[in-house]
Amino acid sequence: MSSVKITKWQMISVGVCYMIGAILHLSEVSATAGRDAWLMPVAGLIMFVPTAAIYCLLVKLHPQKCLYEINEQALGKTLGKVFTFLYMLFFFHICTLNTMQAEAFVSAYLLPGTPVIVCGLMMTAFCAFAIYRGLRAIIVIPFAFGIVSGAYLLFNFLQSVPQMRPEFLRPMLAQEPRVYLHAAHIEATVIYGEIIGLLTFAGMLEKKTKFSVCFIITMIISCLYLILVHLRERTLLGDLTPYVSFPSFGAVRMIGNVTGTLSRVESIYSLVMIAFSIFRVLITLWAVITALKQVFNLQSYTSLIIPAAALAAVYSMRIYASPNDSYIYGLNTTPFVWTVFTFIMPLITLVFAAARRLLTKMPTPNTSRKLPEQGAEPSGAEGF
Amino acid sequence: MKKLLKILCAAVTLCVILLSLGGCWSADEISHKAIILGISVDFADTPEKYLVTAQIARPSQLKASSADGENAYINISSEGVGVQAALHGFETQLSREIYTGHMELIIFSEEIARSGLTPVLDYFYRSSEARFSTPVIIAEGRAADLLDIQADLEQMPVSSILGTMSNQDSDIIMSGTTMGDLLREMVTEHSAVTLALFRVNGKRAAMEKAAVIKGDKMIGSLTIDQKQYELLAGGEYDEGVQVCKIADGKVASFRIMKCVTKHNLKYENGQFSADISVNITGQISGITFGGEEYTIRAREDLEQILRDFITRGINDMFSATKEINADIIGFNEMLRRKYPRDSKSLLENWDDNYRNFPISVSVAATLTGTGAVRERVK
């Protein structure tokens, strides 16, 4: 358990900034649901409710514990470590995917011609430094940056309102049901599901603060934000949306008119987007490092920061030949693979945790045998 | 030992910072860029090649252009099998790297527009520098000639053309269709879009028609008057002037202050139809005939003249577009949005069905003023 405590709003800002960082990954949903993509955050959220309930229950059953500590408490040391190791791989994959997307974006639009390795190294170096500075630095970044950037994103949305064409949203809900199911699945597992990273901060939450409250507020704000992003994409780009590599950025590039008075507003927007993406890299890198610390029972994670960050930077260049491959993979395979990490594994953990709780509450005929305290390792836990 | 490590780390960091103060090793300075303001694309004399001409700004001459007779721009041309190849050819003629991030205009020749825009547009919409908000126009004859016109009131031909478009935009004659608009229509089945069609007369250019693009090909053109009625029927008309020519050389002109257009699509007895209602508010601008009876006291008569004139104009415009089979208002999209299931069979053969698609137009005109005088001065 960490000595650093985070408040309710700090936790929410971490969650919301993490979700906004997914903005570069929304093209899968836009391409699948087309003109109804703006409804998918709601459909995805509904589909995500059981998963959210699992996360909240896990934290409720194990207050003041992070995801990896919960794993070990619920599943026992061995299986817990196996789960933690799998989560580490999952977060490492997300970390490198995000780094790759951010690199592709920077070298295509923000600093054209900049070598990808330079972008990757700079991003991961920044994240490594923030993690080295400690949890407080990680929390302060989104809290300060999130408010300013959130206000800018809102302003930027209002700028695009005059050029929006609401008729591009019609006809609503006229596609086949499987289209919505597919899009909602992507939204629930890939966009919302990755918020499982927030559970790595659950152990640092102030005692009086309920994780479920923070989580629900985070999800609602994120859902509203995603709706706005999809609405803008569609009302500005229309049927062009699936053709654009980064639809949300492409939509902002549409803002402008023949006199040029309102054009080139995307410069600041792209900076904000990339900052949020880096924050997403930061959180996932943090999740990787803390998972490794837990797996290897280390006292401090400092020695893991540089190797993990360097590996993420290098692996981000090797993970896919191009971001388009990631996009195709994200359309068909990722939602199913991610379901294992974001739903099935937490569900297994919850079942074990609930069973353990039931066992500890059940009166035993042998009164001489001392029941283990909640959270303590029961004998034979390794057998799980 | 720990202190020594700290000092070492600080020294290394300081060295890295000092080294990077000089700038990036592959710095991309703006002063080393050839900033392209406009690009024209023609077919080259060499078969299967394009002639791309770029207007490049000369920032040093921007203020002093009129004083020393030097232009604030240069035009350079290059041939290539594609736009990208031709642009690459610029690199052999220029001391600077070309930059299209500030490109304000793309011009295609009518010949290219008629043969298909996809091969030439592909480069522009893939480029991370080019912008979807860049206006696209068509040139009658050689597109490169448009970049060589005499820009009397502006420093560069591109600015002059853009000024003409935006100036006309406020006076309703032509709105600028951007690359984004064009692409959006291109991916929408059966839709057509109009682009400004410029003609070069000597050293001057004028916007005389509107090119109708369907799919990615130019299939015909509309007159400026027809373009006005397209804007009126499409609900993109804000304000402007309507000059109603009546028999025997009589002319009544009106200043339109406000225009509201509504589309009502109907599906009755298995038959689709569209009602367009245009509600105009304006004032008398000039009358060349009649006596006292044609003042504000005869408002109803004048409103009738305006109403009939606009109704006839819109109907003529629809006849013209039906002849070339170009649904420039986008009824197919409106039907698809309003009746997604019922309209499926109709839209499958929309190219044929548009010719017989019933469109009724009703115009309401209200004249609210007589200008600076109340009565006609005899």
Image: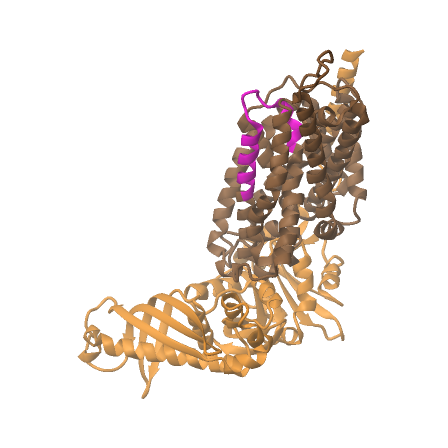
Chain colours: A brown, B orange
Which residue reaches farthest front?
A: A365
Which residue reaches farthest bottom?
A: B248
Q: Is residue A346 above or below residue A188?
A: above
Q: Nearer the viewer, residue B30 or A85?
A: A85
For the question of whether residue B22 can be seen, the reply is no
Q: Is residue A211 magenta?
A: yes
What main secondary structure does the magenta stretch of the protein show? helix
For the question of whether residue B230 can be seen, the reply is yes
Give the residue drawn at x 37%, y 66%. B260
Q: What stretch of residues is rendered in magenta?
A: A198-223
Left or right: A256 as drawn, with respect to A1: left
Q: Position of residue B343 (x, y in %)?
A: 54, 72
For the C terminus of chain B, the image quarter is: bottom left
Q: Is residue B111 above or below residue B153?
A: below
Q: Position of residue A109 (x, y in %)?
A: 66, 48
- Quadrant of the image occupied by residue A354: top right
